[in-house]
Every structure is written in C-alpha cells, then in structure tokens.
Image: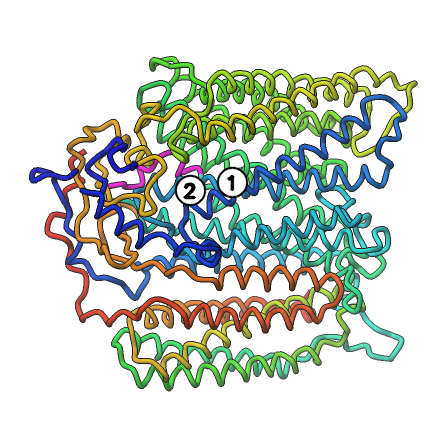
C-alpha cells in the first residue's frame, strides 16, 4: 500500500477506503477493453516510454549490423541495398520513433505530477497520440521486414527520394510514417502546454515551475512551430510520388525545386535537435539540483537560456545546407547564428557547474550519467563549432566526421541524461531501485563503448571516409579504426543488455525505495511510488520553488475537489491562482479507433489518393461518436460566475 | 494526513466549468491554430520560393493558345464574400452562447452549416478557375495545394458545426457544449481570417508578381 510511503503525507488519502474509491474512479475498468480505453497519463506515458525503448533497441541492432559490415574492408555481410535500408531506418527510428516520443513520454508521465495535478488536460487525445505513434512505427518496421524499408537516408533528399530515382513504395512508407509520428508529437505538445498552463497547483507561479517542466514546455512550443515543416515537406514529396497526383514541387523540369525540400526539411530538422536536447537539459537540471542538495544556481538564467535556445534554434537550419549554392550573406548569417547558440548552452553548463561546486554533491548513478553527458556533449559541441564554419563544413561534409559529431551531440546530449533519468525516476515508477553495481557496469561500458565507437569516426571523417557507403577498399587504410569502432559498438550492446537485465530484475526484486530516495525537491516525490492513479488525494498548495524540501509535514492543501467525478483544479496562467474546477473526459475506445483509421488511411494513401477522402469520412464518423459519447452534461453556470475562494491568497507567503 | 491545523484552500465555491478563454480546451484550440498557421506560412513561403523559378507567373501555355492563365476571380471573390458574411451568424451564435440563449444558437448554427456547404461548393468552382491541372507544373501544384488545404479546413469546420448543430437541436443546452461552440467559433474566425492573405496571394499574386 503506497499511500503511507509518500514524502508529503498531507497529500495522501486519509485511509485505505478513501484510497480505494479514488483508485476506482481514476482507473479504467479491468480487462482488455478497459486497457485499450485507458486514458490515465501515467499508463499512456509508460506505453510511450516502453515502445520508444523497444524501437531504440531495434534501431540499435541495425546500427550494430552496420558496424559488423564496416568492421573490415570489402565485407559482403550486408549488400548495398540492405545497408541503405538499415541506415535509413536506423536514423529515422532513432529520431522519430525513439527520441521525440521518449522525451514526450517522460514529460507526459512526470509533468502532471510535478505541477501537482491528477491527469493531463485532454486524456483521450493523449491516448490517441500514443496509438498514432505506434501506427507510424509499425508502418516503418513492417515495411522493413517486407523488404520495403525506407532507403533514401533519414532526411530523404530529393531528387533521390523523388519518383524518378526511388521507384517502389519505400519512400512513401517513410513519408507516411513521418505524418503519423508528427501528429502524435503535436498532440503531445499541445497536451503538455495546456496542462502546464492551466492545471498547475495553486501557488506554482511561472517562477516556481520545476526546470524539467520548463524544458518540456519550451520543447512543446518548438514542436508546434517545427513539426508542420516536415509534414509539409513530406506531403509535397508524397504528392510528387503518388500515381494520379504527380505534382511537381521538386521537379526542376516543371519549375519545381530540390532545394525547397532541403529548406523545409531543415526548418524542422534543426529545431528537432533541440526538441531532443532541451528535455535532456531538464533531466540534467533536476538531477544536478537534487544531488547537489541546494537550490539550482541561476534558475532565471537557465529558463531564459532554454527560451533563447528555442528561438535561435529556428535560425540555424541553413547550416545543414552549406554545401548547396546559397548566398554568402546567408552563409555568414547562419554561421554566426550557429555559433551564437553556444551562448545559452554555455550558460546552462556554467549554472550546473556552479550548483555542483557550491552544493554538497553526492555522486550517485544519475549524477554520474550527467557527468558523462557534460564530457561527451562538450566534445560534440566543439566539433559543432568547427562545423558551423563554412570552409571546414565543406571539407568534412557527408563524411564520418559529421556522423561522429551528431552522435556525440545526440547520444551525449540526450541519451546519457535519459539513462540518468531512468535511474533517477525508476523508483518513482516501480517503487524499487535499480541495482547499483549493475548500474555502474552499465555506465562505464556505455561510456567507454561510446567513445571507442564514435571517437575514431572523427579521424575517419578527416581522412575522407564518406558516410552512407556500405564498404571501402583496403588501400584506404581505414580498416583498423573501423574495427575499433565495431568493438566499441559491441561494448555498447553489452551495456544496453546489462541495463535491460537490470530493469527486468529490479522491477520485481529490487531494493524497495524510500518515499524520497534521492532527497529530491519536486512534487512527484510528494506522492506514493508508484503514484496512485489519481496522483494526489489532496492537490498541494505550492509556496516555494522546492515544495518537498519546504516543511513537507505542514504542506497546505486544496480541498473541495470532487471525489465522485474526475475533476481537476484549473489555475491562472501566470500566478496559478485557483480559477475554476474542470471535469476531465472519461475513458473511451474512440481514440484507439481514430488512430486505427488514421494509420490505415496513411497506409492506403501510398497506393491511391482515394484513400484520403474515404479515410476522412471514416475519421469523421469516429470523431462524431467520440464527441457524442462523452461525459454527463453539466448544468449551465449561473450568471456572474467566479467567486474567488475565501482564502485564495494563501500561497503568497513564500 | 491532513490535520485540524493544516492550512487549506477550499475550491468548492469555484465554478465547476468556464465557457471562455480560461478553459483548457480554448488554449488547445489556440495551439492548434498556431500549428495550422505555421503550416499555411510554409505554404506561402513555398509559393514565393517557387515563383523564383519562373519568368512568367503563372506560366504561359502556348500549346492551346491560352495566354491568359491568371486564375479566375469570380467564384473566388464570391467565396471570400460568403466567408466574410459567415462571420456574422458565427458571432451572433457566440454572443447567444454568452447569454445561454438556446434558440438563436440553434438557428445560427444551422445557418453556419448551410453557409459552410456553400463555401465548400464554391471552392470546387474555384478549382475550375485555375487554368492548370495540379500535375502540369510547380505553379499549379502550389495553387491547388493551397486551395485544397484550405478546403480541408472548410470541410472540417463545417462538419464540426454540423455535429454541434445536431446536438443543439436534440439535447438541452449544457455548459460543456456552450463552451465547445464558442471554441468552434474561434476556429471558424481563423478559417476566414487565414483565407484573406491566401486569397490575395493566390488570386492577385499572379497579377502583380
């Protein structure tokens, strides 16, 4: 029984009976149908996390197979065709099916608890987002197993990906996978922003929002303004390719333009890097604060850095296109913007270091992963500054130097913090700790394996080894460094296996975690581990930035929310003053049905444009049913609404 | 566990729902419109980017002796006017929602559905006024895509209005659906508003550029 095991007992159910009736209210009915109708944010988020991790593993296996192919010169383990499919599906999976959904899954689990509410603002839409993502992922991977794996690179440049050079349906599958996963990403982003804007606990004004939540809000805004670009780019591409539609967006013979595709793609693609990286900075800020045992240094500077990164992140996309004929003015602009983004990143790193050096750091596993992150990410940042300069970029364009750079940035910048986050929040999810010594093995094999794999790629790139070519001749002399990289990849594989074993074993047999095992300050530790379905029996009132460090036994609470309908408290956007109560939608099967209709539509539109109107028709039917089968209607409010609660000024005492 | 001396905020006196911009769904709609506006912004960017590849915009077509390839203004302008007019009943419904006035909502929403059907029908005539098929060149591709993408919104908005209208006639007025209608109104205003620059670009762009 987890109720007594919370750091802030004030927020828990007063007795077992109260706990049970609330669990019943906030849980779906038992059985398969109930499972499919489930809209609890923790369950949906855990599906995101597990699914994204499975895709991470699958894409990792593809990477390992590619490393075997490259281990020695002129191997024929994979042919060129299979190699093309593997690197494309590897990259696309890591970006679209692992990184973004994983970060959103983490947010959808943690953000509602961190801001002190009971579920996300739109629980049904949340479930729809997950199933759509799953549909996109299945489309890409079933394609690969049917020998129709996308094979034009993860950014599918035209004209290679156009109708003339990529006949068949491989690229179509890729384009429609993008559409489905981006719908899901957008849905998640709207969900997160609306939840944070409107459902924060009373007193959690903007300057008291946990940094992880800030990071996810900024990321969600980036998703909203970046993802439409890739949807438009892939929609044009799909229309150019689709029989009976055959537009000419990218066909130069009819006035189309191949560079247009690159602009649209990278207008999404560069912000995408920050969409992956900014949530990771949220993990880092959280972990650094907890293990330093002091308030984070430079909270405002950190928040402003996140926002600055988001803005500058939209002004960098052309640096992916330095090897194309763009005006010199453009090159200079995008070079300086690319260098400018180092400023907010630098501010963040210095704030973290200042927090660590002025606190009393305890070196636990999550913090170790953060150290790994700082080291690797700084190295990736250094090659980033090199690549921002046009002359160097032209030299190493499309070589393994670029491959080394972005793996340092993405694995260093996102995957290391993510693993830190896994170790950090595993006790929250399961009530048990991950095994410590296996964890150390996991970290050191990952760290060593990673550097062994990717550091040699810098040198290979400088020696001119091109990326995306399935083999090389012995005379190039690249064999030994490649062998080293393959050995490194093997070590990473071992490391990941250790992690999976650790999770599977610790889940059932790990050490039972304390209520607040790391001594963390944020609200997710105020409730039980794992949290009850309703998160908080009494919604907390927040009086400081570190609500759990701050006199937990005297925590003021909200009373008067319903215990018979799924009701949450809505507060004002800036000051989080209680504003109104809000009934959340009940569980429903229609999100799943809508996702099935969308996925089938995007599958059949590969073959015929008629799939679109037919799919739209069925989607509308499902939406009508979704709308019609909602909650019990609420009576109209009386005129002259909104009496503020008598003691609404309580949280002002900070 | 809370005790007698635990400080509390009692929210039971707060309204159980709101029907305006304080509602989460209102914000979700605004965020959706941010997404959609970005998409149309990129479509406009595409339009001007592709313009750079042409000496004549729209391209001339000598084969069939058709030199005047500017898109027809007639149906397009008629549709723009219908869209402008549609804002009036929508706003009236919006005001009626504020006063919880059932009959004007029912009638206004029915008018909205009819006007929506008119704009959808007019849009199909607009397609016939584009002097190219979508698969003839890049100009045709972007013009058809712009018209088509906006058509999707007209259909969606009208379908949404239709289901709301059905609800308003069949069920008693309740707070949730009053709010939904008002959020739907914001969506409709946006559909009309976004078409103003798009209409100018699609129909007057070729005449000016």
Kindly identify which chain the residue marked by label 2 belongs to.
A
Q: Secondary structure at mark 1?
A: helix
Q: Earlier in the sequence, mark 2 or mark 1?
A: 1
- The boundaries of the magenta stretch are A203-215
A407 with respect to B189 (left or right): right
Percent of width and height locating residue A92: 67, 42
Give the labeled residue for mark 2. Answer: A109
Percent of width and height locating residue A573: 31, 49
Q: Quadrant of residue A501?
A: top right
Percent of width and height locating residue B43: 63, 59
In the figure, B208 relative to B65: above or below? above
Q: Nearer the viewer, residue B196 or A62?
A: A62
Res B164 seen here: yes
Q: Residues within 10 Å of mark 1 (few under 14, many from 20)?
A: many
Q: Residues within 10 Å of mark 2 (few under 14, many from 20)?
A: many
Kindly identify which chain the residue marked by label 1 belongs to.
A
Give the labeled residue for mark 1. Answer: A49
- Same-subunit check for callouts 2 and 1: yes
Contact, mark 2 vs mark 1 (Cβ under 8 Å): yes
Which quarter of the image is occupied by the C terminus of chain A?
top left
A71 with respect to B82 (left or right): right
Q: CA distance from mark 2 to mark 1?
A: 9 Å
Which quarter of the image is occupied by the N terminus of chain A?
top left
A654 with respect to A350 (left or right): left
Question: Which residue shows up at 66% across the image and 23% down it?
Answer: A386
Question: Which residue shows up at 77% across the image and 55% down it?
Answer: A250
In the figure, A596 relative to B163: above or below? above
Color scheme of the displayed model: rainbow
Query: Is residue A644 located in the magenta-colored stretch of the structure?
Result: no
Res B199 seen here: no
Question: Which residue shows up at 77% across the image and 73% down it?
Answer: B133
In the figure, A476 relative to A470: above or below? above
């Amino acid at each position: 029984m987890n109720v007594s095991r919370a750091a802030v007992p004030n927020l828990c159910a007063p007795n077992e009976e109260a706990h049970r009736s609330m669990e019943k209210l906030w849980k779906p009915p038992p059985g398969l149908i109930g499972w499919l109708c489930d809209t609890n944010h923790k369950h949906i988020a855990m599906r995101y996390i597990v699914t994204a991790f499975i895709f991470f593993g699958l894409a990792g296996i593809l990477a390992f197979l590619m490393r075997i192919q490259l281990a020695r010169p002129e191997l024929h383990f994979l042919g060129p065709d299979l190699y093309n499919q593997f690197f494309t599906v590897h990259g696309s999976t890591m970006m679209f099916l692992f990184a973004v959904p994983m970060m959103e899954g983490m947010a959808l689990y943690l953000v509602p608890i961190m801001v002190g509410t009971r579920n996300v603002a739109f629980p049904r839409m949340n479930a729809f987002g997950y199933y759509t993502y799953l549909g996109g992922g299945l489309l890409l991977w079933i394609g690969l197993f049917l020998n129709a794996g996308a094979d034009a690179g993860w950014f599918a440049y035209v004209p290679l990906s156009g109708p003339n050079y990529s006949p068949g349906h491989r690229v179509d599958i890729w384009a429609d996978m993008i559409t489905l996963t981006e719908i899901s990403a957008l849905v998640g982003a709207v969900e997160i922003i609306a939840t944070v804007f409107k459902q924060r606990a009373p007193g959690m004004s903007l300057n008291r929002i946990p940094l992880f939540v800030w990071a996810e809000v900024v990321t969600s805004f980036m998703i909203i303004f970046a993802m439409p670009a890739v949807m438009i780019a892939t929609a044009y591409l799909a229309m150019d390719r689709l029989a009976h539609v055959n537009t000419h967006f990218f066909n130069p013979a009819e006035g189309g333009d191949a560079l247009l595709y690159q602009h649209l793609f990278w207008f999404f693609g560069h912000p995408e890097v920050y969409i992956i990286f900014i949530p990771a900075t949220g993990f880092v800020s959280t972990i650094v604060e907890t293990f330093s045992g002091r308030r984070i240094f430079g909270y405002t500077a950190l928040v402003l850095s996140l926002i600055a990164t988001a803005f500058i992140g939209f002004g960098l996309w052309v640096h992916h296109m330095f090897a194309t004929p763009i005006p010199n003015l453009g090159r200079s602009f995008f070079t300086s913007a690319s260098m400018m983004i180092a400023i907010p990143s630098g501010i963040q790193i210095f704030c973290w270091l200042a927090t660590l050096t002025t606190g009393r750091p305890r070196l636990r596993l999550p913090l170790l992963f953060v150290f790994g992150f700082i080291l690797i990410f700084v190295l990736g940042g250094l090659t980033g500054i090199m690549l921002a300069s046009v002359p160097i970029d032209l030299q190493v364009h499309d070589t393994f130097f670029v491959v080394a750079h972005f793996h340092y940035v993405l694995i260093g910048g996102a995957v290391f913090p993510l693993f830190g986050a896994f170790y950090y929040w595993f006790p929250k999810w399961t009530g048990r700790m991950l095994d410590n010594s296996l964890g150390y093995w996991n970290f050191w094999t990952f760290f060593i394996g990673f550097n062994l794999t990717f550091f040699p790629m810098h040198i290979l790139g400088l020696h001119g080894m091109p990326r995306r070519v399935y083999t090389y001749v012995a005379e190039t002399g690249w064999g030994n460094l490649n062998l080293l990289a393959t050995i490194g990849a093997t070590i990473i594989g071992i490391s990941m296996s250790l992690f999976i074993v650790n999770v599977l074993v610790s889940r059932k047999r790990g050490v039972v975690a304390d209520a607040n095992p790391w001594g963390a300050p944020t609200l997710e530790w105020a409730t039980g581990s794992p949290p009850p379905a309703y998160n908080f029996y009494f919604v907390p009132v927040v009086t400081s930035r570190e609500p759990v460090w701050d006199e937990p036994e005297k925590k003021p609470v909200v009373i008067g929310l319903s215990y018979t309908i799924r009701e949450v408290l809505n507060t004002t956007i800036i000051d989080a003053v209680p504003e109104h109560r809000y009934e959340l939608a009940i569980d429903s099967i229609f999100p799943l049905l809508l996702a099935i209709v969308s996925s089938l539509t995007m599958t059949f539109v590969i073959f015929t444009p008629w799939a679109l109107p037919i799919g739209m028709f069925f989607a509308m039917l499902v939406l009508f049913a979704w709308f019609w089968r909602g909650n019990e209607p609420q009576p109209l409010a009386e005129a002259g609404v909104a009496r503020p609660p008598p003691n609404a000024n309580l949280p002002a005492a900070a | 566990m809370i005790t007698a001396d635990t400080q509390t905020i009692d929210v039971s006196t707060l309204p159980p729902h709101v029907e305006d911009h304080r509602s989460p769904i209102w914000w979700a709609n605004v965020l959706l419109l941010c997404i959609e506006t970005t998409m149309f912004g990129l479509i406009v960017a595409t339009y001007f980017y592709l313009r750079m590849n042409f000496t004549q915009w729209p391209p001339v077509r000598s084969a069939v002796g058709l030199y005047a390839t500017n898109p027809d203004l007639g149906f397009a302008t008629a549709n723009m006017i219908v869209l402008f007019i549609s804002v009036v009943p929508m706003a009236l419904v919006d005001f009626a929602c504020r006063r919880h006035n059932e009959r004007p909502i029912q009638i206004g929403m029915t008018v909205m559905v009819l006007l929506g059907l008119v704009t959808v029908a007019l849009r199909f005539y607009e397609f016939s006024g584009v002097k190219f098929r979508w698969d003839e060149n890049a100009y045709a591709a972007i013009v058809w895509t712009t018209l088509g993408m906006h058509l999707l919104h007209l259909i969606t908005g009208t379908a949404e209005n239709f289901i709301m209208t059905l609800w308003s006639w069949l069920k008693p007025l309740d707070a949730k659906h009053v709010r939904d209608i008002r959020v739907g109104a914001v969506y409709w205003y946006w559909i009309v508003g976004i078409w103003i620059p798009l209409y100018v670009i699609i129909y007057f762009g070729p005449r000016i550029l």
